[in-house]
């Protein structure tokens, strides 16, 4: 017996089958559209994330720059640079600058007899007063080394009168120390004085250190000379090199002291003691 050929329903399937296939097709189409939408959203999120990361990196760099500027410069000067009023960048270069060192006489020996709290209190008192004077004269505060203060003038903000600023700062620091002596005598029954060294000349200035920690500082023979002069200076004495002396004759009276030798320099260096020029 030969079977009859399937009718229309046999070839197309039953109605439930057709509906099921229709639903499957629609679901696949919806799934494809959803996948496409998700891909579009992912691409948009990736673009947004890249933009946000760039913004974050820029803000972090700005915060790091602000932190560094506020570390070395007066708050007012740092803010003027950050606001765009002054165009200043911290770059590595060789420049004609003036370097300043001050050192407290007798502090190390006295520290051995002082209580830790008293030592820290007195040192902080001294450094706070000196830092105020540094910023007043536009100096770049390089670092504190114990009781020593290192400052340079002429960078990152250009200053034609960098030697003059350093010397006037030294005069004011010496006067402020006299006020501090009275305070310390009443509070601690002892006092200190400072010796100051200043040298003007070509130095290398820039970021020195490692990726983990660096300082914006100066290097060179003139830096070593300023440190040597501060170490050599007697209590209350301000010693400078001949080049510094020549740049400050309008505000200071100089007296030749001696000639000293410095490693790396063949000729002796003349040094002078400075006092304020009478008005």
Image (cartoon, rainbow, N blue to C red):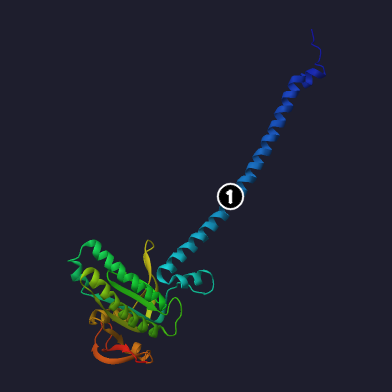
Considering depth in this image, is 52 or 80 the residue closer to the camera? Answer: 80
- Of residues 80 and 171, the one nearer the viewer is 171
Q: Quadrant of residue 133?
A: bottom left
At 31% from the left and 80% from the top, the residue drawn is 175
Give the x, y percent position of residue 82. 51, 69
Quarter holding residue 204: bottom left
The quarter holding residue 226 reads: bottom left
The answer to which of 40 and 277 lies nearer the viewer is: 277
- Residue behind mark 1: 46
Q: Which residue appears at 30% of the width and 86% of the height? A: 240
- Residue 132 lies left or right of residue 193; in this view the side is right
Residue placed farthest to the front in the image?
186
Is residue 75 positioned above or below 258 on the image?
A: above
- Residue with the most extreme top position: 1
The picture places residue 117, in percent across and down from the top left corner, at 25, 61
Please provide percent x and percent y for residue 266. Answer: 27, 87
Q: Residues within 10 Å of mark 1 (few under 14, many from 20)?
A: few
- Report how many numbered discs are placed on residues in the image: 1
* Quarter placement of the C terminus: bottom left
| Quadrant containing the N terminus in the rendered view | top right
Identify the secondary structure beneath mark 1: helix
In the image shown, does 270 or 263 lie closer to the viewer?
A: 270
Q: Find residue 49 and report its horizontal and vertical position in percent.
A: 56, 51
Q: Is residue 47 above or below residue 85?
A: above
Q: Is residue 130 above or below residue 15?
A: below
186 is higher (above) or lower (below) than 165: above
Q: Residue at x 51, y 58 (%)?
A: 57
Q: Residue at x 20, y 67 (%)?
A: 111
* Left or right, residue 31 beside residue 46: right
């Amino acid at each position: 017996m030969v079977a009859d050929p399937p009718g229309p329903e046999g070839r197309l399937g039953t109605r439930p089958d057709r509906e099921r296939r229709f639903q499957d097709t629609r679901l696949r189409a919806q799934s494809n559209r959803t996948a496409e939408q998700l891909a579009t959203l992912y691409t948009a999120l990736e673009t947004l994330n890249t933009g946000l990361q760039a913004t974050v990196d820029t803000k972090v760099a700005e915060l790091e720059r602000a932190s560094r500027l506020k570390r070395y410069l007066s708050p007012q000067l740092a803010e003027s640079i950050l606001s765009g009023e002054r165009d200043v960048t911290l770059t590595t270069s060789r420049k004609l600058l003036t370097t300043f060192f001050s050192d407290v006489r007798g502090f190390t020996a006295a520290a051995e007899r002082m209580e830790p709290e008293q030592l820290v209190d007195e040192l902080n008192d001294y450094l706070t007063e000196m830092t105020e004077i540094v910023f007043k004269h536009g100096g770049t505060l390089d670092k504190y080394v114990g009781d020593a203060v290192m400052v340079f003038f002429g960078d990152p903000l250009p200053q034609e009168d960098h030697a003059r600023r350093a010397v006037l700062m030294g005069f004011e620091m010496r006067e402020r120390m006299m006020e501090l002596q009275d305070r310390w005598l009443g509070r601690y029954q002892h006092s200190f004085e400072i010796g100051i060294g200043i040298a003007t000349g070509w130095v290398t200035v820039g970021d020195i250190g490692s990726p983990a920690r660096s300082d914006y500082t100066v290097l060179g023979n003139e830096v070593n000379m300023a440190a040597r002069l501060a170490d050599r200076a007697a209590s209350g004495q301000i010693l400078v090199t001949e080049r510094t002396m020549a740049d400050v004759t309008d505000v200071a009276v100089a007296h030749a002291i001696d000639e000293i030798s410095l490693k790396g320099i063949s000729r002796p260096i003349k040094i002078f003691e400075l006092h304020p020029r009478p008005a």
